[in-house]
Structure formats: structure tokens, C-alpha cells
Image (cartoon, rainbow, N blue to C red):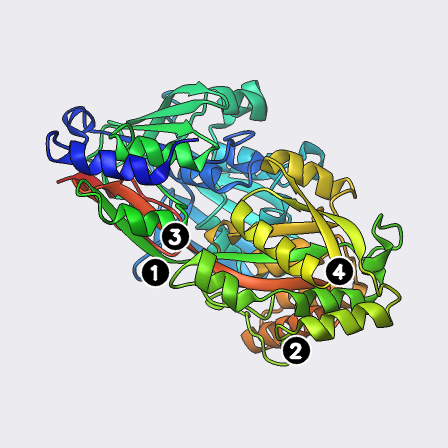
């Protein structure tokens, strides 16, 4: 593993002799690395952040939410209206073509939505589309979406994770073919996908001029999948890369001294929490006892982890949602202060005076997971870290093995609680507690037309989850971006670098 301080010193020496990233700048290319590998770049069969980033560059959505104003604008749709509480009609844009030349029209919307909302097709992101009953073609450039239930957040979802595929191509190749050779209407098209290694994007010269996404000025974006973050940092210092994100705070602070780099940070919508499986057949029977779950809440010094490991801008959370999301609140929820003595007492009361052994599953922010393990061991819980790639982590969780899980969730950048808490507590694939009372409250919050009724249902559900200590709400995450000083880049809280807005100075 490269020595970080040595590399920093070398970079400072090289910076005085060589212009930074000149080759990439001359080629009008951004060389970007990420630490996770998407199992499939089809937006409906991926739920890791790099897949979300790729999706927004390669595909378009029907509606667009302006990240500066939060105003909804027309993207592949030009107008929309509610016919009734469960019927949404949209007028579609004309003159748009997919990267393979197919014309965009109502058939693409109908095929995409009907395919991905069908549970038989096993979309990984079923929670993003399970409110859709079906889509119907009204005319070549008009569609109706029929909802299974009232779902006030529908517009937010249509402006976020719901991308539109080319119907003829998708019918032919399916999700696997879409992964191998992606085709969208977005500002960038995929010219190479070496799965697990890299994905190369080129500017779409035929991108429609009226899109709320501005026409890109960067010609190429080369994305490499490099799981080792230290290697990413080394390449940034030696000008082998132009852009990385999720850099550890201590490294980011040291990299501020490197003349050819810019370091920026900010809070994101991504929350961090621990899940504890409390179902009857859980392999860790200790989690069946709420006193054990409460003990774990008291055992971890969340504020210290935020200060020492997460970085400036993050905040401690008391409920499983991000504060800006509609319906998110900690009103009525208990606050579990850091109190190792109380944690030990609760464990003894529950019949575990000497603690117990347990595997903690994690897939990112390893240093934070290791810190949590230290706090748990201090109260007698001997946690063993099982660190996996996300696809393997999710398989273990959904298979009932990973019942103690270090989770992060970015809600696909949807600014509504329905994209967050219900994913883990509404009897969906990632719910390892399955409390019917919590589920019913979340169903009510998701489907109520009255905004105040939605808020009340979510408030009660979030407080109930906290009172029964089904999880440990930890904190929001900050993201440290490190990039060439010659790049003009704007970060947003949704963890989505918009390369179509970025340019070389």
C-alpha cells in the first residue's frame, strides 16, 4: 500500500515542474475513479451510488428537479397533470433520439414502466417503482401512469431514479444486454464497458437542446473502478486521475497542501445506521431482546465518530431518515446518549453479562465500521468485521445471514421519506425486523394525500422504530471531493457529480 505522506511530498515536488492533468485537459477528458463496482449499470438493477451517477449521465427521466432551486422542469416530458388521485398524464417531448438512433415516444415510456414495475422481472430497485400499476399509451407523445395507490411523491420519483429505456432495444437485450451496451437519451453515451474495470463515456453530439441539463462541454469521462481508496489517492497525487470522491477526511485535509488539487466537502443526503435483525429465526437470538438493541445504541459514541472520522458538515441522527426529506423528524423519538455503563447494565439485565459474539457486515467506510467494533468490544460485544462488496453484502442481508449490518443509504437522491425509511421497515427485501405496526404507519405516510397526515404517520413510525431500538441511527455522511484545480466543478448535497455542468478552466 502506498505511503500517503511520501506520496504527498512527491506530489508537491512534481507540481513545481509539471502542469497538472495537461494531457486530460488537452483531450477534454475527465478521468474519474470510484471504489465500488456496479453489478449492473441498468438503473433498475443497481443500487450503489456509482450506478446512480452513471444513470444520470447516460439516461434521462421524464421530469427533472433543478438541484439549485428544487423546481420541477420538463425533461423527456414537457407537461404533466393529475387526472385523479391515481392517474397521471404526461405530454412527451418530440424530436428526441436514443444513442442507437431509436426515436423516443410513448412506446418507450410504456414498455419501461410496465417492465420494471412487474415484480416478476425482479428489479433490484423495486421500491422505486412498486407504486406503479401500469402505463398506458394515449397517443404517440402522450402517456398515462396509473398508480396502485395514491402516492403524492410520484413526481419526485419521476424526477429521480426512474429512467426511460428504448423499448425495442430493451425488449431485445434485457437488463443484461443493457448493462453490457447501455443505451439512453442522456448527455453522454457509453462507448466502452469493461465490467468491473472501467466505463468510458463520450459527449452525445445529438443531445436535445431544450433539456434542463445543459449541453456538456467535457468530451469524455473515463470511469475506473478502483476499490482501494489509497490507490485512488496515489493516482490523484501523480496526475493519473482528475477526480475522486469519498476521500477520508484526514487524507483530504493533507491533500489541501497539494498545489494542483482542489479539495471540497459537504454534507450529503446519505445516512448511516446499523440494522439488527429481530425476526424469530434470526441467527443472533440476542437481537430478539430490545434491551440488547438499546445497549448497542448506548454503546457507540456517534459524536466522536463524526468529529474524528466523518468530517465537518456531518450531523448525528436520532431517526432513520435525512432531515431535509419530507416527513423526516425526530420528534417523539428517544435519544440514546453514549453511555457504556448503561449499555453493560442492559446487557446484563438481558442475560448477557459477558456479552456475546457477532459478525458485523459492512461494505463501505471501513474505518467507521472498525471504530464501531471498538466501542462494541468495550461493553463486551465481540464483533467480527465481515467487509464485502455491496452485491455480496446485500445477498447476505436478504438471505437472512447478515442480521447485524452497517448500512448507508442515499435514497437515490429522492427528497422524501418514502425513499428512505420504508425501504428497510415496510416488509420489503431489506426489512429484517418486519413489525406490522411500523409497516402500517409507513403505508399510511406513503399514500396519504393530506401532507399533514403524511407527516403525522411518518413521525409516529420513526418514533416507534426508535423506541423499539430496531436500529442504531448514526449520522449523515459528508463527501470529500478531490479534483484537478483546472476543473470548474460544483458539488451538490445529492452526491451526484454532474459532469455535464463541469468544464476545464
Identify the disc placed on residue 380: 4
The quarter of the rendered structure image containing the C terminus is top left
In the visual, does 358 lie left or right of 455?
Answer: right
What is the CA distance from the residue labelled 1 to the residue labelled 4? 50 Å
Instruction: Work out whether mark 3 precedes mark 4 in sequence or the reverse, and give the earlier one.
Output: 3
Disc 2 and disc 4: Cα gap in Å? 24 Å
Q: Earlier in the sequence, mark 2 or mark 3?
A: 3
Residue beneath disc 3: 249
Counting residues from the N terminus, which is met first, the one under dot 2 or under dot 4? 2
Q: Earlier in the sequence, mark 1 or mark 4?
A: 1
How far from the left and from the top, in percent, is residue 51? 48, 37
The quadrant where residue 351 appears = bottom right
Mark 1, residues whose alpha carbon is within 10 Å: few (<14), some, or many (≥20)?
A: few
As helix, strand or loop, the secondary structure at mark 3 comes to helix
Point out residue 316 in the picture as x, y percentages from the top left corner.
Answer: 51, 68
**How far apart are labels 1 and 3 at the CA level?**
32 Å
Quick check: 259 above or below 45? Answer: below
The first of marks 1 and 3 along the sequence is: 1
For the residues labelled 2 and 4, say whether their Cβ atoms are less than 8 Å apart. Answer: no
Q: Could you say where residue 303 lies in the image, as x and y percent from the top left? A: 51, 68
Residue 60 placement (x, y as % from top left): 40, 39
Amino acid at each position: 500500500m502506498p505511503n500517503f505522506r511520501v506520496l504527498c511530498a512527491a506530489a508537491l515536488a512534481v507540481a513545481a515542474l509539471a502542469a497538472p492533468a495537461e494531457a486530460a485537459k488537452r483531450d477534454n477528458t475527465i478521468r474519474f475513479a470510484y471504489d465500488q463496482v456496479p453489478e449492473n449499470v441498468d438503473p433498475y438493477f443497481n443500487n450503489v451510488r456509482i450506478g446512480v451517477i452513471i444513470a444520470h449521465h447516460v439516461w434521462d427521466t421524464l421530469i427533472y428537479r433543478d438541484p439549485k432551486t428544487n423546481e420541477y422542469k420538463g425533461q423527456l416530458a414537457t407537461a404533466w397533470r393529475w387526472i385523479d388521485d391515481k392517474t397521471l398524464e404526461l405530454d412527451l417531448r418530440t424530436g428526441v433520439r436514443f444513442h442507437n438512433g431509436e426515436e423516443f415516444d410513448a412506446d418507450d415510456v410504456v414498455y419501461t414502466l410496465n417492465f420494471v414495475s412487474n415484480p416478476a422481472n425482479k428489479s433490484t430497485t423495486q421500491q422505486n417503482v412498486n407504486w406503479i400499476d401500469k402505463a398506458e399509451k394515449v397517443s404517440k407523445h402522450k402517456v398515462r401512469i396509473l398508480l396502485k395507490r395514491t402516492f403524492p411523491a410520484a413526481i419526485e420519483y419521476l424526477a429521480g431514479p426512474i429512467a426511460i429505456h428504448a423499448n425495442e432495444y430493451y425488449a431485445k437485450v434485457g437488463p443484461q444486454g443493457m448493462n453490457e451496451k447501455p443505451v439512453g437519451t442522456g448527455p453522454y453515451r457509453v462507448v466502452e464497458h469493461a465490467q468491473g474495470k472501467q466505463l468510458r463515456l463520450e459527449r452525445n453530439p445529438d443531445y436535445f437542446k431544450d433539456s434542463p441539463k445543459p449541453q456538456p462541454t467535457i468530451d469524455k469521462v473515463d470511469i475506473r473502478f478502483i476499490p482501494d481508496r489509497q490507490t485512488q489517492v496515489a493516482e490523484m497525487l501523480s496526475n493519473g486521475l482528475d477526480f475522486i470522491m469519498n476521500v477520508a477526511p484526514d487524507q483530504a485535509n493533507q491533500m489541501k497542501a497539494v498545489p494542483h488539487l482542489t479539495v471540497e466537502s459537504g454534507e450529503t443526503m446519505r445516512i448511516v445506521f446499523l440494522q439488527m435483525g429481530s425476526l424469530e429465526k434470526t441467527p443472533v437470538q440476542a437481537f430478539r431482546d430490545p434491551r440488547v438493541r438499546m445497549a448497542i445504541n448506548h454503546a457507540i459514541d456517534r459524536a466522536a465518530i463524526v468529529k474524528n472520522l466523518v468530517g465537518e458538515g456531518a450531523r448525528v441522527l436520532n431517526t432513520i431518515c435525512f432531515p431535509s426529506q419530507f416527513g423526516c423528524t425526530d420528534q417523539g423519538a428517544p435519544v440514546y446518549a453514549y453511555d457504556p455503563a448503561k449499555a453493560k447494565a442492559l446487557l446484563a439485565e438481558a442475560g448477557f453479562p459477558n456479552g456475546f459474539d457477532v459478525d458485523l457486515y459492512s461494505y463501505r467506510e471501513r474505518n467507521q465500521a472498525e471504530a464501531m467494533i471498538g466501542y462494541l468490544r468495550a461493553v463486551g460485544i465481540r464483533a467480527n468485521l465481515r467487509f464485502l462488496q455491496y452485491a455480496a453484502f446485500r445477498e447476505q442481508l436478504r438471505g437472512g445471514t447478515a442480521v447485524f449490518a452497517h448500512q448507508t443509504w442515499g435514497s437515490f437522491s429522492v427528497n422524501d421519506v418514502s425513499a428512505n425509511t420504508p425501504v428497510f421497515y415496510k416488509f420489503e427485501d431489506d426489512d429484517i425486523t418486519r413489525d406490522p405496526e411500523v409497516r402500517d404507519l409507513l403505508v399510511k405516510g406513503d399514500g396519504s394525500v393530506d401532507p399533514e397526515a403524511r407527516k403525522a404517520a411518518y413521525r409516529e413510525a420513526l418514533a416507534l422504530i426508535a423506541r423499539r431500538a430496531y436500529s442504531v441511527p448514526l449520522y449523515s455522511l459528508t463527501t470529500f471531493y478531490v479534483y484537478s484545480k483546472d476543473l470548474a466543478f460544483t458539488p451538490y448535497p445529492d452526491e451526484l457529480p454532474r459532469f455535464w455542468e463541469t468544464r476545464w478552466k
